[in-house]
Image: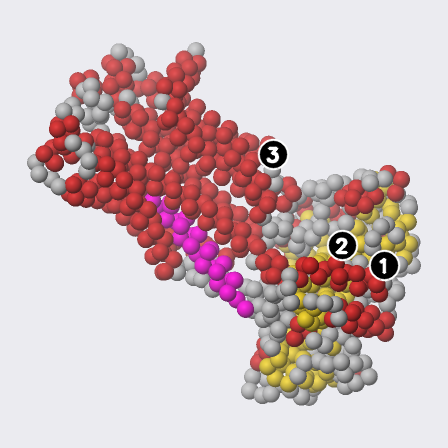
Amino acid sequence: MNTLQDIRFAFRMLLKRPSFTVIVVLTLALGIGANTTIFSAIDAVLLNPLPYKDPDRLMVVWETNKQPGPGMSDRNEVAIGNFRDWRSRNQVFDQLGSLFYTDMHLTGVGEPQRIKSCVVTTNLFQVLGVQPVLGRSFLQEEERPGSTFTVILSHDLWQRMFSSDPNLINKSLTLNGHQVAVIGVMPPGFELQFPTSIHVDMWVPMAIGEGDFDRSMNFLYAVGRLKQNVTREQAQSEMSLIASQLQQQYPETNAGRGVRVVPLHKQMVGNVESYLYMLFAAVGFVLLIACANVAGLLLARVTARHREVAIRLALGASRWRLVRQLLTESLILSVVSGLLGLLVAYAGIKLLLALTPSEVPRLHEIGLHIPVFLWTFTISIVTGLLFGLAPALQASRPDLTKALKDDSGRNPGSSQGSRLRNLLVVSEVTVALLLLIGAGLMTKSFVRLQQVNPGFETTNRVSMYIALPTQKYRRQQVNIFYDQLIERVRNLPGVKSVAGIDPLPLSNNNVTTTFVVEGAPVVNLADRPDVGRRIITPGYFQTMSIPILKGRSFTEQDRENTANVIVVNDALASRFWPNQDAIGKRLGFEDDPGKQVWRQIVGVAGNVRHTALETDAMPEVYFPYQQLPGNFMNLVVHTDSNPVSMIPAIRSQVLSIDKDQPVADIMTMEQRLARSVATSRFVMLLLSSFSVLALGLAAVGIYGVMAYLVTQRTQEIGVRMALGAQRRDVLLLVVGKGMVLATIGTAIGLGAALALTRLMRNLLFEVTPTDWLTFVIASLVLLTVALLACYIPARRATKVDPLTALRYE
């Protein structure tokens, strides 16, 4: 009964001061909404279990390599021979499957389509614990070469291209010129976003022959399901033992190669985990500032109600009864703010999905789910207690004698309340400075990243991926196709130059190879240096504006019946011939020393940051495509205007040569460059937004305290002015009080930032976590905003009429 009375009374009191109630609710709703928005992302990406059976038992098994190279030495793809030995020898996995990604041509269903596909061992879906919702999974015998070609479709492709036809099962499609039978459709939303976020529309079984034990080509990704009661550490120990056995058994290929076992969930979230937790800390700070603001408002409000509180105590109300009543008001405010915060979060999630890079895994799962509602409800209650408890306790300890004698509306004994308000201001400034410094460091890091020269020009350049089916195009046909295509595109109006490369920089694709230097001592295959391999057409360096530092680039005369030539980049030349000229040196790339083909270096090209702007340029070797033809090629076209307008004309040239040949991954090079820094831009924008919000809330908090101070000291100010104080003196009095608090908060914030920003070290690019310029600028910005927040009420204080102030009692 008392609870209902408290609630009814709290509502009456809040409705009597609608402006106060609206300000509090809006302030808290912003903090709770921002908090809920980021928590929804953390819940979907980090906390929600993977949508597989017993996901904690799923492990990724990488091959490690002590030989330094362009990739991560502790997370390399697996050679098929090593994978087969892992699968047959281990005793820790129930099952071990593998996969690799490719593209396939789908013809006979409208325009030819390039379908992102995943080639899998037939047990992969059993490893994951998922089954098709329509049809069946792969059978073990479908892994043998020569078995019937089968395919399983994604639910999205089944809906998009086949109108959810349930009779599609066992019907045939034309893939890469072959007839394949559709045997199943996967559940809606099923994706294996490993090793990165890749949307797959088709799964096909991997054909593994009895004698297929190659150990030199690493291209498989391995996923295993641990046996019951087997830990990751036990699996790591056994797989390392198997790797050491293979090192001894096959020293030519496996020397220095080990194994690393990583939980699938940890592999998927990758660096995103650090970014999300940093953003979560940021919105937590914003909520703390909002709570401090509201606590200051409530403190001022209960101070104004000191006479009411004193009368209730004098009439016999207990201190706990008063605290409960005031906490009820705070909880009502926080619950209403939480409901409004959900609306803010709904809009925030929409914005978050629009801004979030596609590389963030499980993006489609972000939303206002039950855990998010529970989180919002929890933080609303905690927030109500957090900002309401101190004012309630403060209000329940009035000086009854003074309070009952006073009828001015001012608290005659509020020194303790003043200390609490000062503490709230200092804490707001401290937290706001932490956010400002963090945002400043991320912004400076992003600016540095954008200033990095990728090694090529992106303006007015568009690229597209073409993959010729091997059944239709052999070596000679491949050369003829690309020769014709490049010639036709070159003659299009508006085209300045055109060329091809595989793989393309900043395309999330990389190919490496090993080599030996002619005349150098013979070393095992595993000990050879690892470098990037690029196959290009003549004119590629010109099209991408990559400088030739020495020698020459490829010409139309570098064909299959002429001397074998290569171009290396400056990183490779500097590493292996630091004080010599690399021109004329010969390299071999064959695994068998007895069948070595020597290729002469004819040019040294500028370095290109192939994988990412934040990654140093790796050693690279360029091969002329006529001498090392491949069915895959990225066409790069340099135009004299907007390259997007040229896409239909370029596509039509492809179809004019082969009506069944699709093109895919069409994107301008500027878009690729923007995508490569999308995650950094995303974090910078959010962190900057939160820091601006925190700065605004801190300014409001300082303004509120200073305005309250002016109101409480109106008579004192009047007396000072009546005794001869100038307006400047009054201005300095009020501004000085506020700036002392801001300066103390800034000093504490700088000390906290020196400690906490070190946690951002791995998220920054060419910026130290203690960058002094960022610290200074953030401090000056905060102090300037604080000065403005103090100046407005101070200026109002200078306009106090002394006569009016002396009659204030």
Which of pointers 2 and 3 lies earlier in the amino acid sequence? Answer: 2
Q: Position of residue 708 (x, y in %)?
A: 26, 32
Q: Classify mark 3: residues with Cα within 10 Å, few (<14), some (14-19) or many (20+).
A: few
Which of pointers 3 and 1 lies earlier in the amino acid sequence? Answer: 3
Q: State the residue at coordinates (20%, 21%).
A: 408
* Main secondary structure type of the part rendered in magenta: helix
Mark 2 vs mark 3: give the one in front. 2
Which amino acid type is marked by label 2?
Lys
User: In the image shown, does 366 or 245 lie closer to the viewer?
Assistant: 366
The reply to whether dot 2 and dot 3 touch (C-beta < 8 Å) is no
Disc 3: which residue:
369
Q: Position of residue 242 (x, y in %)?
A: 71, 62
Tell me which corner region of the image, top left, top right, bottom left or bottom right, holds residue 170.
Answer: top right
Which amino acid type is marked by label 3?
His
Above-or-below relation of 439 to 374: below
The residues bearing labels 2 and 3 have C-alpha atoms spaced at a distance of 30 Å
Quadrant (top left/top right/bottom left/bottom right) for the N terminus: top left
Above-or-below relation of 352 to 313: below
Q: Which residues are magenta?
A: 427-453
Name the side, left or right, on which 11 lies relative to 311: right
Tell me which corner region of the image, top left, top right, bottom left or bottom right, holds residue 428.
Answer: top left
Above-or-below relation of 806 to 580: above
Mark 2 vs mark 1: give the one in front. 1
The residues bearing labels 3 and 1 have C-alpha atoms spaced at a distance of 44 Å
Disc 2: which residue:
116
Disc 1: which residue:
660
Element carrying mark 2: strand
Q: State the residue at coordinates (74%, 67%).
A: 492
Q: How is the image coloured?
A: secondary structure
Q: In the image, is residue 431 part of the stretch drawn in magenta? A: yes
Q: Give the residue at the far left of this rendering.
A: 723
Q: State the residue at coordinates (90%, 57%).
A: 178
